[in-house]
Amino acid sequence: MKRRLLVLYLLSALVLCASPFIGAYFISPDALFGGADPAASQILFELRIPRAALGWLTGATLAICGLIFQALFRNPLASPDMLGVSMGAALGAVAYIRLGISFALFGLISGLSFAAFTGAFLAIALLYAAGSFKRGGLSMGSLLLAGVALNFLFGSFNMMIQYTGGFADSFKMMRWTMGGLQTVGFASALASLPGLVIIGAVGWLVGPQLDLLVCGEDMAASRGVSVKNLRRLVFFFVSLVIGVSVALCGPIGFVGLMCPHIARALTGRSHRQLTISCAFFGGAFLVICDTAARAFWAPTEIPVGIITSAIGSSFFLWLLVKGRG
């Protein structure tokens, strides 16, 4: 187990370090120290290294969010995408773009991040409302289906807003909803860092409670876990973090669904350990997908959300087939 973890950490670090040199054209490592081509150094430090850092942080964040949701719902198919949280965040962000407004809360939180968080929080609130309509509440499986329905509902609202916009706005919103890691400088990477720190701390702190919860709510409650308070706490922080992630990169699907499964197979089922493993695996996975998106079809660049969706949907089908077997 320790050897697997060490290999995972080293491979993740290697992917993060090697990715900036690969792209539409290869950049020699001597560009790190100035090199013979000043333009190559500028591209490396202003575009590729910040982009790799943003991809790693975002992938790690999404993977931990998926891990927590799968434990909370005791369902291997639960993730922020499937529950409509990502699409809710996208709806808030698209509405913000369509209205053409611009503001910042306290000069620190951008209006786009706030709108995305509001959309994610709305999705969670509607899930809770759906559960409260039925006496005794909905089962976790029914809540998951309610999340899928919300995902389609928010998706239809997104398309409606895009359709009513002008050509330029519609193209901008459509391109943004495909997900992407385009950035200049380290501002976006630094903005995503608090989200990873927050959700990583949440995953580590509630890890032992999640270990009990996956054995059943009654088991967890008998060991002193307040399931209701745990859900509220987790839902709030996942909504907050997904909102920031979507505001920075758009909705990038299936990272939160797929990465926890692979990390679990590599490193066991302790949620404290899995929180760290998911971060390293999810970060490396998204950086690899983004490198492929900007290298394989060069000079054309494919939105990374298309790559993750293609891989993730295949993995989703494999999970369903494996479940039936």
Image (tube, rainbow, N blue to C red):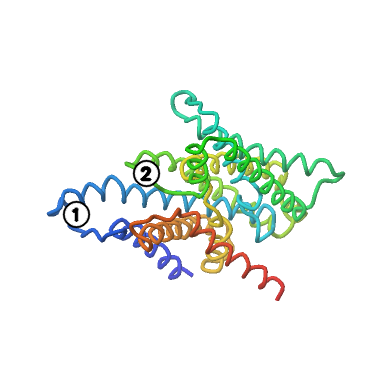
Most extreme residue toward the top is: 106
Circle 1 Cα neighbour tier, 10 Å, few/some/many (<14 / 14–19 / ≥20): some
Q: Please provide percent x and percent y for residue 57.
A: 43, 49
Judge whether 18 appears above or below 111 on screen.
below
Please give the residue where the numbered disc 1 appears in the rendered image. Answer: 31
Q: Quadrant of residue 66?
A: bottom right
Q: Amino acid at mark 1?
A: Ala
In this view, the mark in front (2 or 1): 2
Please tell me the numbered disc located at residue 121.
Answer: none
Please tell me the numbered disc located at residue 183.
Answer: 2
Q: Quadrant of residue 156?
A: top right
Q: Amino acid at mark 2?
A: Thr
The front one of 253 and 63 is 253
Judge whether 210 appears above or below 2 on screen.
above
The residue drawn where x is 69% and y is 70% is: 323
Q: Please provide percent x and percent y for residue 268.
A: 56, 66
The residue drawn where x is 55% and y is 37% is: 94
Report helix, strand or loop for mark 1: helix
The residue drawn where x is 74% and y is 49% is: 146
The front one of 59 and 205 is 59
Q: Please provide percent x and percent y for residue 165.
A: 55, 35
207 to the left or right of 109 = right
User: Circles 2 and 1: CB distance less than 8 Å?
Assistant: no
Q: Quadrant of the C terminus?
A: bottom right
Cα–Cα span, label 2 and label 1:
20 Å
